[in-house]
Amino acid sequence: TDEDPADPSDELVFTGLGGCNEVGRSCHIVQYKGKTVMLDAGMYSGRDGIAALPYFDEFDLSTIDVLLISHFHLDHAAALPYVLAKTNFKGRVFMTHPTKAIYKWLIQDSVRVSNTSSTSDQRTSLYTEQDHISTLPQIETIDFYTTHTVSSIRITPYPAGHVLGAAMFLINIAGLNIFFTGDYSREQDRHLIAAEVPKNVGKIDVMITESTFGISNAPPRAERETALLKSVSGILSRGGKVLMPVFALGRAQELLLILEDYWQRHPDLQKIPIYYTGNTARKCMVIYQTYINAMNDNIKRIFRERMAEAEASGNAKGVSSGPWDFRFVRSLRNLDKFEDVGGCVMLASPGMLQSGMSRVLLERWAPDQRNGVVMTGYNVEGTMARMILQEPDSIPAVMSGSAGGAGQNMGRRTRDGDDNQVMIPRRCSVEEFSFAAHVTGVENVGFVEEIGAPHVILVHGEKAQMTRLRSKLLSLNNTKSTDVKVYSPQNAEEVRIPFRKDKTA
Ligand SMILES: [Zn+2]
Ligand SMILES: [Zn+2]
């Protein structure tokens, strides 16, 4: 009841080095009672060099005890090789097993792409493939629902939905419970376990949650699937090609399950190929086959069915491939061997059409009005993916050889500057259906209410979305006896939360 200022040692200090009032380069610092935890180390899509990194200069990374990586997406994990190889960080790093397995290939792939995709003189190489490979042994893995104690900090990961291996972390420092959602989803999809409120963990004091979609809501899953499939089959029936820009891994697997199932039920479509492009994608499918047990009951059921079928036919190979052994999906290493004739559905990365295979195909297919671009992910501001949704009359050509044989020359720019920019007419259709697997406004507010923390810190959302979500959460205080405090800090802005009660572990 006294009004003395809190002892600074009793304050929890939150500092966002990235991913605050923005989507990208997620990296947050939590300090309490002399302990320091870093959450995620991501990069900003569509930016080069230092501008893609979190504000690491704003914090002494040598003081960090533990770094937790929520999932393998580049906006949460791509700066990790930089942290480990190029800074004075000397703490311990944890991620789940599937996250590490996929991270290994994904970062390797992204390093190779970025080393060949830009001729800009300003582009600094943040780290090399060797930096990545040599720092892999420093990353420790941790299982869902198990608790690790590192210099008196207790860490427990819970399934977050979103993508394979994605975790929400419960962190306990000196009795204080801090809960970080990372990116999360709560709807039942075809392969992942949806996020749940952790059970029997006591009161959660501070919640750090994503706010990607603000208070926006989406139609129910079944409706979105129907609309997506109607759009895809509509483009095919008018003789067009369907371009689905996707991030190499994660939500692409969910889309493949949806398409495969639809093709199975529509024999007339079975002559039309579904392509899934990229080298990393092929390697990582093995990881998806390995971690069936980390997935939901639907995928386990398909796995059992496939095993039974394979056994009945005496095909032992079928047993190991399981539900990810698609019948109507062909994988495509690059565009060299791609015969671009007739209709097809093409899942190509990168998801935001910055460069690479998806951009080559966009530039090749955009002029024909029979073709269609079907967007399904979250599109970061300033990327072509965001721009194309405005249905511009023309788009800048950034890939050379877009008229054919693009695989060889993939990644070279035709022009260094914007002067004399070659433009390509855009006549193809553009539609968007969200399968990004972030919580909707209603789901997020419901989850925040269930967690019931007195302090909620919003991250991973553009300013407008975050502001709306904050207002919504604050409006719920009318129904409460004690107000919930909601923070939406800027990057590098400290949030100080006093905890008077002397908590002890
Ligand atoms: Zn993500
Ligand atoms: Zn994210």
Image (cartoon, rainbow, N blue to C red):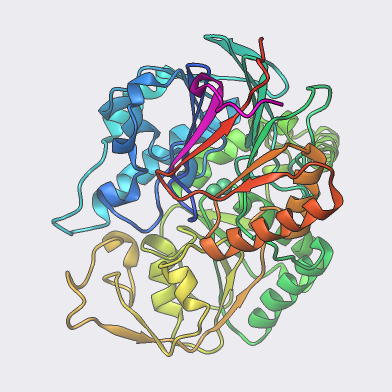
| Residue found 75% across the figure and 74% down from its top | 227
| Residue found 52% across the figure and 85% down from its top | 428
Q: Position of residue 485 (x, y in %)?
A: 67, 44
- Whether residue 347 is visible: no
| Rendered-image quadrant of the N terminus | top right
Part of the protein shown in magenta = 1-17
Is 274 in front, or is 87? 87
**Total tally of numbered discs in the picture:** 0
4 in magenta: yes
| Rendered-image quadrant of the C terminus | top right
Q: Position of residue 432 (x, y in %)?
A: 62, 73
Is 425 located above or below residue 310 in the figure? Answer: below
From the viewer's perspective, tell me whether residue 325 is left or right of residue 387: right
Q: Position of residue 315 (x, y in %)?
A: 74, 35
Is 314 in front, or is 180? 180
Q: Position of residue 173 (x, y in %)?
A: 60, 18
